[in-house]
Image (cartoon, rainbow, N blue to C red):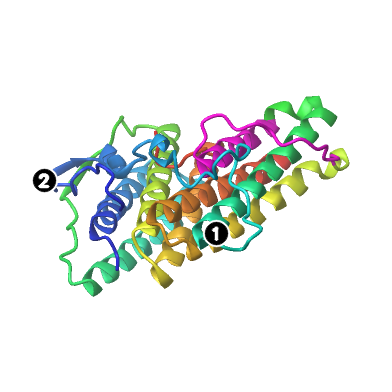
Amino acid sequence: MADPAALQNALAGAHAAVYAYGLAGARLTGTDRARALTAMAEQRRVRDRLLDLLTGEGQSPTPAAAAYDPPFAVDSPAAARRLAGLVEDRMAGLLAAAAGATDGSARTWAAGAAQACAVRATTWTGTAAVWSGEA
Amino acid sequence: MSGKARTAPPVVTRRTVLVGLGVAALPGLAGLSGCSTPDGAAPGPTPDPSGTAAPDDVLRAEAYGQELALAERYTAARASYPKLREVLAVGDRHRLYAAALAGDASPTASPGATRAPAKRTVLAELGRAESEAAEQRLAQCRRAADPELARLLALIGAGCAAAAAQLGGSRG
């Protein structure tokens, strides 16, 4: 029942999100670093669930790229927080699309995960996006 | 997804720009217009008293009413506490959400006064209302038949959860 394209898009995003948290975590210290590591673990769980869903649909999951270029230099804690906020915001939008493309327990999970990403984005940036994934 | 022009699935190159996360960003809420607004009805979808409305129309009407009610709570709070105007701006989203649910670009505010709670609790109460709205949108998302409506409800739920987080963060 699922539309694989939306799941593949979300998976590609989750791969990038895990990578981005590696970049961001390296620039953060203390509480923020711990938060980044927790969020990275959450994005890994998102990635793994998407992998399971796609495999269950008989699809070949989008592989991760070897590396990802951040859209701006991640050379300070402020830039790291901004990147984390951007990643979570985008993931919220991608997971909302995944919710639309699935049904049943997969949809419930995707919509809940979209909310969790939106909350984390707000925690990083201090500002709640009106439409996640739009920017 | 229902026939909307979508970006092709991402091609993974050796280095993929992180901005690629946006490959499936909103195709534009304009695509939502024209969805099941009752003929000649007021701005939003309204529950069908005859009980013959399709389930998605019922969901849409329910979410629309809840979003407008939430918008009204912010309006009342702002009127009572002008100094909180800035933090309460987070509630502006609910008119946009109602508009998207109605397929209407410019919804009219529903009349009716809502009394704002005491100042010390207004942010906490709005935060709780946002969390409840996020739960409601999630439940409605689960029930939606139309994938596009499910996606919209998931997005609105994310926005409500984010607003709850922002209000929670601004209380201290």
A80 w.r.t. A5: above or below: above
User: Residue B137 appears at what percent x and percent y?
Assistant: 56, 56
Residue B36 place in picture, x, y as percent: 48, 47
Instruction: Say few, some or many: other residues with alpha carbon within 10 Å of mark 1 (under 14 / 14 to 19 / 20 or more).
Output: some
Left or right: B46 as drawn, with respect to A5: right
Q: Is residue A54 left or right of residue A78?
A: left
- Badge 2 crowding class, 10 Å Cα cut-off, few under 14, some 14 to 19, many 20 or more, is few
Chain name for mark 2: B
Q: Amino acid at mark 2?
A: Arg
* Quarter of the C terminus of chain B within the rendering: top right
Instruction: Determine if the magenta segment contains residue B86.
Output: no
Q: Where residue B139 sits in the image (x, y, percent)?
A: 55, 63
Q: Which residue is mark 1?
A: B53
Please check the rendered image and state whether residue B109 is part of the magenta-colored stretch, yes or no.
yes
Drawn side of residue B15 relative to residue A111, left or right: left
Residue at 58%, 46% (x, y): give it: B45
Helix, strand or loop at label 1? It is: loop
Q: What SS does tag 2 mark?
A: loop
Q: Considering depth in this image, is A23 or A124 the residue closer to the camera?
A: A124
Is disc 1 in the same subunit as disc 2?
A: yes
Nearest the viewer among B124 and B30 is B30
Q: Amino acid at mark 1?
A: Ala
Identify the residue at image location x=46%, y=66%.
A108
Which stretch is magenta? B87-116
| Residue in view at x 68 percent, y 39 percent | B71
Q: Earlier in the sequence, mark 1 or mark 2?
A: 2
Q: Chain of mark 1?
A: B
Picture quadrant of residue B62: bottom right
